[in-house]
């Protein structure tokens, strides 16, 4: 079974600074997808960024980028120019590309605080 | 395009009762997944429905069940509620063949 680990329960960053959230995963599969979701106090889960394992290029979405290290099974999220609205719980998630279905396996989450 | 909607948003029940939660996916999405979120266990996969058939099931007791209708709307049912069933229940939908799931706002269930 696949597992996802987020070793930082809490992180903080100053507004306009850069922060990196860590995620590691364990799988024997070669085809899979990785995601970062954001959950603000409203509890609505919002997709931040996704990465296909077969792509060597790291995904980017505006101020959000990932560092995908397939051999090390590491998938970190970098937030540049942090804004107050980035404050939320961030979840790393894994989805198999080899089995049917859309089941996501989530990490424990990292609570990000943005200080003004 | 409207997002995933879930009803009701909040629910209070007592132990032993049963509850039904509803989820309407994004138009055109045929896959619907359900997750339970609690402070102690985090986010756990309950089950997934596709074309009215359960495609995947998580490690939950048989008290948790679901179904999907021909219009892709899905319901989940929890019978004989226990205090530990208090949680945020999230529904997510996705297009066939694509990996990204989009989540609804959740239903917060409190069991007293």
Image (spheres, coloured by chain):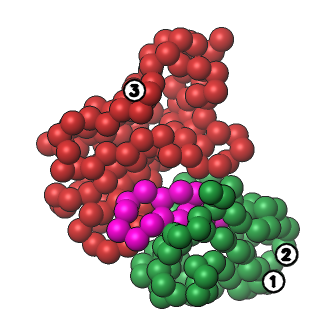
Q: Nearer the viewer, residue A62 or A67?
A: A62
Contact (CB < 8 A) between labels 2 and 1?
Answer: yes
Residue at image point 43% right, 57% down: B100
Q: Position of residue B19 (x, y in %)?
A: 76, 80
Query: Which residue is disc 3 drawn over?
Result: A78
Element assignment for label 1: loop
Q: Tag 3, which chain?
A: A
In this picture, residue B93 sits left or right of residue B5? left
Q: What is the x, y in percent for residue B65?
A: 60, 84
Which residue lies at the image location 45% right of the left edge and 19% below the top edge?
A80
Is A81 rendered above or below residue A5? Answer: above
Mark 2, residue position: B14
Q: Color of chain B here?
A: green
Rendering quarter of residue A72? top left
Residue identified by numbered label 1:
B17
Q: Could you tell me if residue B84 is visible in this image?
A: no
- Quadrant housing residue B81: bottom right
Task: Classify mark 2: helix, strand or loop.
Answer: loop
Q: Answer left or right for A3 relative to A109.
A: left
| Circles 1 and 3 in contact, beta carbons < 8 Å | no
Q: Residue at x 30, y 63 (%)?
A: A96
Instruction: Name the image quarter holding residue B61.
Output: bottom right
Q: Which residues are magenta?
A: B86-103
């Amino acid at each position: 079974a696949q597992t996802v680990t987020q070793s930082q329960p809490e992180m903080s960053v100053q507004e306009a600074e850069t922060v990196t959230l860590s995620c590691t995963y364990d799988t024997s599969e070669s085809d899979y997808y990785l995601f970062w979701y954001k959950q603000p106090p409203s509890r609505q889960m919002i997709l931040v960024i996704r990465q296909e394992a077969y792509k060597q290029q790291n995904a980017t979405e505006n101020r959000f980028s990932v560092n995908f290290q397939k051999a090390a099974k590491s998938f970190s999220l970098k937030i540049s120019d942090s804004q107050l609205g980035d404050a939320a719980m961030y979840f790393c998630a894994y989805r198999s590309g080899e089995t049917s279905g859309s089941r996501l396996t989530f990490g424990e989450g990292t609570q990000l605080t943005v200080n003004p | 395009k409207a997002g995933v909607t879930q009803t009701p948003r909040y629910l209070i029940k007592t132990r032993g009762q049963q509850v039904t939660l509803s989820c309407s996916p994004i138009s055109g999405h045929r896959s619907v997944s359900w997750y339970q979120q609690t402070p102690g266990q985090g986010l756990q996969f309950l089950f997934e429905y596709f074309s009215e058939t359960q495609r995947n099931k998580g490690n939950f007791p048989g008290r948790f069940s679901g179904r999907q209708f021909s219009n892709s709307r899905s319901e989940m049912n929890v019978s004989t509620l226990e205090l530990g069933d208090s949680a945020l229940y999230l529904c997510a939908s996705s297009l066939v063949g694509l990996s990204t799931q989009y989540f609804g706002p959740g239903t917060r269930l409190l069991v007293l």
